[in-house]
Amino acid sequence: MGSRVLSPQSSVLSPDFPYAVVTISEELTWKPALYRKGRWIFEKPRSGIERFKFPAPVGPQQIFSTIHSETATLPLSFPSLREASFKIGFPDEIIRAALSPSIVHRPLSIDGSTKVASSDCEITLALVRGNSGGKRVQRQAYCKVMSSEGHSAGDWDTVWPPAIVSRMIGRGEIQQRGVFAPERIVPLNAFFERLRAIGFSFVRH
């Protein structure tokens, strides 16, 4: 699941989209795919609403199910997995703007005006529940990214991970060739170490 907090300057008339508004619109309107007990099911858009407390500075957010590619490979990579889903949270102004046809289809105009630097935070959180030694257990881990150097948090966590993996392939640190789920071939310790070096933070509970 993921959520995002915006700066106080963001508004309904000028939303600070974390990435392509058309993509956000699809995430809000397409049926989310959930993996349950060995099969995929599709639910209504923005179903499964709940209030979830993210770490600071995001804090409590309303999240809902959305279609996201991450869940597609998890049952293959972890055969014992029984359920997988992805939920996302956006500020209300982002949701309203992304669902507005006038904004989604409006041509982008660049007039040379100064762009206001983004001030935001994005948190991607994994929540895992299962059984271990006959006991019910829960584990949580999250990655926090802050905007910096004029780039939004969404810019950073969209661009850096594939860039690092591309360099790993080029340097021979990843030998496999073809199409693979990242969790199956990326050397995680080295991957996380390089993300930390550029400002990503990781916490496990």
Image (cartoon, rainbow, N blue to C red):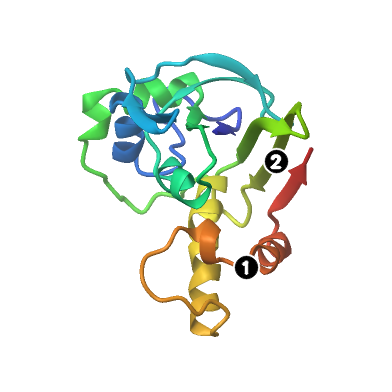
Q: Nearer the viewer, residue 122 or 50?
A: 50
| 73, 116: nearer the viewer | 73
Q: Position of residue 199 (x, y in %)?
A: 70, 57
- Say how many tags the image has: 2
Q: Which mark is residue 187?
A: 1
Is 199 positioned to the left or the right of 19 in the image?
right
* Residue 189 spot, x, y in % from top left: 70, 64
Q: Is residue 24 visible?
A: yes
Horizontal and vertical percent for residue 198?
68, 63
Q: Position of residue 183 (x, y in %)?
A: 54, 57
At 50% across and 59% down in the image, what residue appears? Answer: 182
Image point (29%, 25%), residue name = 29
As drawn, the residue found furthest toward the bottom would be 171
Q: Secondary structure at mark 2?
A: strand
Check if mark 2's residue and mark 1's residue have beta carbons within 8 Å: no
Disc sitting over residue 141 in the figure: 2
How many residues crowd mark 2 within 10 Å: few (<14), some (14–19), many (20+)?
A: few
Tag 2: amino acid: Ala
Q: Amino acid at mark 1?
A: Pro
Q: Secondary structure at mark 1?
A: loop
Q: Which quarter shows the C terminus?
A: top right
Q: Quadrant of the N terminus?
A: top right
Front one among 96 and 8? 96
44 up-or-down from 103: above or below = above
The residue at the point 49 percent across, 14 percent down is 49
Residue shown at the point (65%, 62%) measured from the top left: 188
